[in-house]
Amino acid sequence: MEPSQWFAPWRLVQIALFMGLGLGAIFIEAAPLGLTANAYPSPDLLFCVVAFWATRRPESTALLAVFALGLVRDLITDAPVGGGVLTLVLAAEFLKALSQGLGRRNFVTQFLLIALVSGIVVLVQWAIVIALLAPPPYLFDLIRQWLATLAAYLAVVLVFRGLFRMRWPKPAVV
């Protein structure tokens, strides 16, 4: 991308929309719903928004924006500060790098890649908690949260494609 396109008005609008949707996902995640001991783990909605946006609009998923969203979530929730930021930024950059190729694949392949990346994010965050000598969550609960995140990703895809008509980026001309 050329430096003249960095601050293009339409790109700034897309980044602002991305940030607004990311903040909405954070506040939904942080809402005190289901506080009972046997409550179902909530999905990682911020990951769903970032994954969708990074694969469909990689030029509008600015590294600084993803970092800021991850930091806000780490500060608002009970996560170790920095662990969520690290995994979110790495996942976003990985998905942005693959976005051109993903557009040529069928949805099952795309979904399996998102599932794999989401699973790696969960495992890395679990390892960070262990490295900090904090009591880690049970793996069974993490698997339930991972499955909830995958279901939420499907919902995010349906809603965002319907609302914003976001498709895959056009392949680069060689």
Image: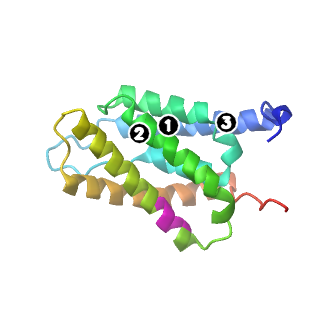
User: Which circle's residue, 2 or 3, is located before the other in the chain?
Assistant: 3
Can the viewer see residue 87? yes
Residue at image point 43% right, 61% down: 116
Left or right relative to 73: residue 56: right
Q: Are marks 2 and 1 in contact (CB under 8 Å)?
A: yes
Instruction: Residue type at mark 2: give it.
Output: Ile
Query: Over which residues does the magenta segment extend?
Result: 110-114
Residue at image point 28% right, 45% down: 126
- Mark 3 vs mark 1, foreground winner is 3
Q: Secondary structure at mark 2?
A: helix
Instruction: Residue type at mark 3: give it.
Output: Ile
Residue 18 falls inside the magenta stretch: no
Local crowd at mark 1 within 10 Å, few (<14), some, or many (≥20)? some
132 or 171: nearer the eye? 132
Q: Report the disc number at residue 84.
A: none
Disc 2: which residue? 28
Disc 3: which residue? 15
Q: With respect to residue 2, does 53 lie above or below?
A: below
Q: With respect to residue 89, does 103 lie above or below?
A: below
Instruction: Residue type at mark 1: give it.
Output: Gly
Residue at image point 48% right, 50% down: 48
164 or 54: nearer the eye? 54
Q: Report the disc number at residue 24.
A: 1
